């Protein structure tokens, strides 16, 4: 019986809470719409839009420069110019490792 009364109480609380929650949500949404539509907010939005339009070419140029720099850096890494001394790229274009000096040495393996 206690489980049933608990479930009935949960259901009643959910229904009542949902109705009150929806009403409050509508109040908040209406107020937010009024605020967004107000003159001072829209004036500031227009100012920001114009600033973005004015700065777009400069930002695009800087992004282009950064992208070129990143591509050059990535290309250098792919070519193997930043590889450790023990790794080199062979004439076949594949990576090769210098294994001299690695491990415990001859005759010391288990």
Image (cartoon, rainbow, N blue to C red):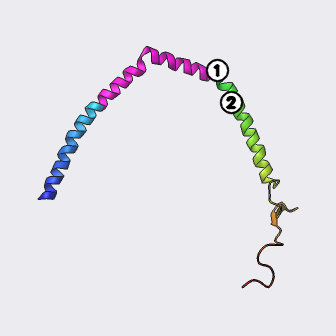
Q: Label 1 to label 2, Cα distance in Å?
A: 11 Å
Q: How many marks are shown on the rendered structure?
A: 2
User: For this view, does 63 lie left or right of residue 40?
Assistant: right
Q: Which residues are magenta?
A: 25-54
Which residue is under mark 2? 60
Task: Find residue 67 and report its horizontal and vertical position in percent.
Answer: 72, 39
Please give the label number shown on residue 54. Answer: 1
Structural crowding at the residue carrying mark 2, measured as other residues with C-alpha within 10 Å and reported as few (<14), some (14–19) or many (≥20):
few
User: For this view, does 64 lie left or right of residue 48?
Assistant: right
Task: Find residue 59 and report its horizontal and vertical position in percent.
Answer: 67, 29
Residue 60 sits above or below residue 36 on the image: below
Q: Quadrant of residue 82?
A: bottom right
Specify the farthest residue to the left: 1
Structural crowding at the residue carrying mark 1, measured as other residues with C-alpha within 10 Å and reported as few (<14), some (14–19) or many (≥20):
few
Looking at the rendered image, the quarter that the N terminus falls into is bottom left
Q: Secondary structure at mark 1?
A: helix
Residue drawn at point x = 34 percent, y = 23 percent: 31
Residue drawn at point x = 69 percent, y = 26 percent: 58
Looking at the rendered image, the quarter that the C terminus falls into is bottom right
Q: Nearer the viewer, residue 43 or 90?
A: 43
């Amino acid at each position: 019986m206690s489980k049933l009364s608990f479930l009935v109480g949960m259901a009643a609380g959910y229904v009542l809470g949902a109705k009150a929650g929806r009403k409050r949500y509508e109040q908040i949404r209406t107020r937010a719409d009024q605020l967004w539509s107000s003159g001072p907010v829209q004036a500031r939005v227009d100012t920001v839009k114009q600033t973005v339009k004015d700065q777009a070419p400069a930002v695009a140029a800087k992004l282009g420069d950064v992208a070129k720099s990143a591509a050059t850096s990535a290309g250098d890494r792919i070519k193997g110019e930043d590889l450790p001394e023990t790794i080199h790229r062979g004439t076949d274009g594949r990576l090769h490792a210098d294994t001299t000096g690695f491990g415990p040495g001859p005759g010391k393996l288990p």
